[in-house]
Amino acid sequence: MSKTILLTGATDGIGLEAAKLLAKSGHRVLLHGRSKDKLASASAAVAAVANDIDVKTYCADLSTVEATESLAQEVIASNDRLDVLINNAGVLKTPETVTSEGLDIRFAVNTIAPYLLTKALLPLLGDQARVVNLSSAAQASVDLAALANATGLDDMEAYSQSKLAITMWTNGVASSLQDRSIMLVSVNPGSLLGSKMVSDAFGVQGKSLSIGAEILSRAALSPEFEQASGLYFDNDAGDFGPPHADALNITQCMAVVEAIEQTIARVKNARVKNAGS
């Protein structure tokens, strides 16, 4: 049965390769990116292997709460169901580290945007739906103050904390949705894969992108992930395994969820206040 699958950050890297793999298997893919030109190129690349499967694109900058909310509304308006959400978009090294909303861009894109998008799209995610969140082997204990406001963390500190934070909210939300048959899983797609992000950050070519694309496809579709909600898949090890110890503490996971909720509310309140002044 054909699935409708939304992939964020699908204009290059493992996002694009996963989109092509899923489309080639007969699934309807919804591609997100922040560049219209790159989206057009990605759409053409996916369409070339899609066997007449519909390919739809959405342009949004996930570094802001406002744009992420608008993306969710656009997806809801143009689809009657969503079977899989793959939160793949990510940032590591960038010249501008503080967003227009005063957040660290790594937390904004890697942690907060996927949380907000997932919660907003829950009405579209029916029984047996899946949410696949991109984690990383790089994980570090989360400074909640840095999540809420840019505090000047260096690139790897912010990235590692943001990737543990997405792993933690995945576990927290999975726990809170036990009454619904939605599977939420965090996945380390593989270390040092050959993406632009890895090249820019580490100056290395990296391993085949197919390694990450294949595990995202499995997480989206394979029976081995049917009961994986709240788990962590480490593709470096090729199996489910323990994430950072903080992600196994449900109290700490829910503290991250609460911090994200408070940050989103503060940003939205500031927007309303600024609009009225």
Image (cartoon, grey):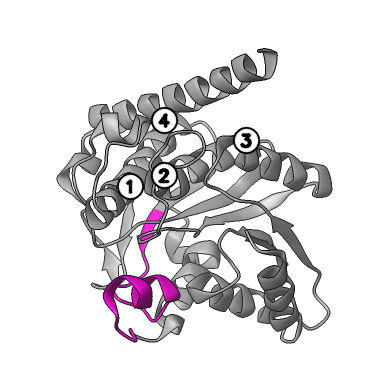
In the rendering, at what x and y percent does residue 197 appear?
A: 40, 70
Percent x, y of residue 172: 37, 34
Query: Viewed as shown, does residue 167 lie left or right of 57?
Result: left
What is the crowding at mark 3: few (fewer than 14 residues within 10 Å), some, or many (at least 20)?
Answer: some
From the viewer's side, name the closer residue of 44 and 51.
44
**Marked residue nearer the N-terminal end (3 or 4):** 3
Query: Which range is magenta?
Result: 186-206
Image disc number at residue 66: 3
Q: Quadrant of residue 152?
A: top left
Image location (x, y in percent) of residue 251? 25, 27
- Label 4 neighbour load within 10 Å: few <14, some 14-19, many 20+: many
Of residue 247 and residue 116, the one placed in the foreground of this image is 116
**Which three-letter amino acid code belongs to the residue tagged 2?**
Thr
* Circle 2 residue: 111
Label disc, if present, on residue 260 of the rendered structure? 4
State whether residue 177 is above or below residue 185.
above
Q: Which residue is mark 1?
A: 162
Under circle 2, the secondary element is helix
Q: CA distance from mark 1 to mark 4?
A: 11 Å
Mark toward the start of the polypeptide (2 vs 4): 2
Which mark is first along the chain, 2 or 1? 2
**Amino acid type, label 3:** Glu
Amino acid found under the numbered disc labelled 1: Ser
